[in-house]
Image (cartoon, rainbow, N blue to C red):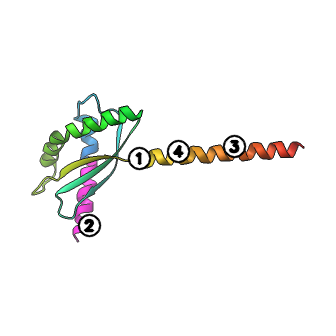
Amino acid sequence: MESQRSHRVGDQIHKEISALLIKGLKDPRVGFVTITAVEVTSDLRMAKIFFSAMGSESEIKNTEKGLKSSVPFLRRELAKRLRLRYTPELVFQFDSSLAYGNRIETLLRQVQTEHTDDQDDSGEN
């Protein structure tokens, strides 16, 4: 039963943090950020927020610093919006799975192109 509640709270935190990033956060370091997932502990004391961002590695690091510095503001806003006894501690973590997926897709396309080129070369002989 607790895992179902933590899942529901995680979904609500996901929605609220996404809305706050769009409307309420004024930090210039935080550019285009997508919240990919939120994991909440069963006691609802900590929420790990996974995010994805566009840009170079240094831009992503700056975005992460901006998000971490905005944690007090985000917790305060979450406390206003969520009716919980305790507002969870927020921990932001970069989600590299999208970049990893893009890298695999690029490699597969490259292999497919090489395979097609090899077939065209062998078909002409």
State which quadrant residue 77 falls in: top left
Q: Residues within 10 Å of mark 3 (few under 14, many from 20)?
A: few
**CB under 8 Å between discs 2 and 3:** no
Of label 2 and label 3, which has the lower sequence position? 2
Q: Which residue is mark 2?
A: 4
Q: Single out the mark in the foreground, 1 or 2.
A: 1
Give me the C-alpha separation between circle 1 and circle 4: 11 Å
Please report the bounds of the magenta region as a residue range.
1-15
Q: Which residue is mark 3?
A: 113
Element assignment for label 2: helix
Of label 1 and label 3, which has the lower sequence position? 1
Of label 1 and label 4, which has the lower sequence position? 1
In the image, residue 105 sits, relative to residue 31, either above or below, namely: below
Element assignment for label 4: helix
Q: Which residue is mark 4?
A: 103
Q: Residue at left 86%, top 46%?
A: 123
Q: Residue at left 23%, top 54%?
A: 47
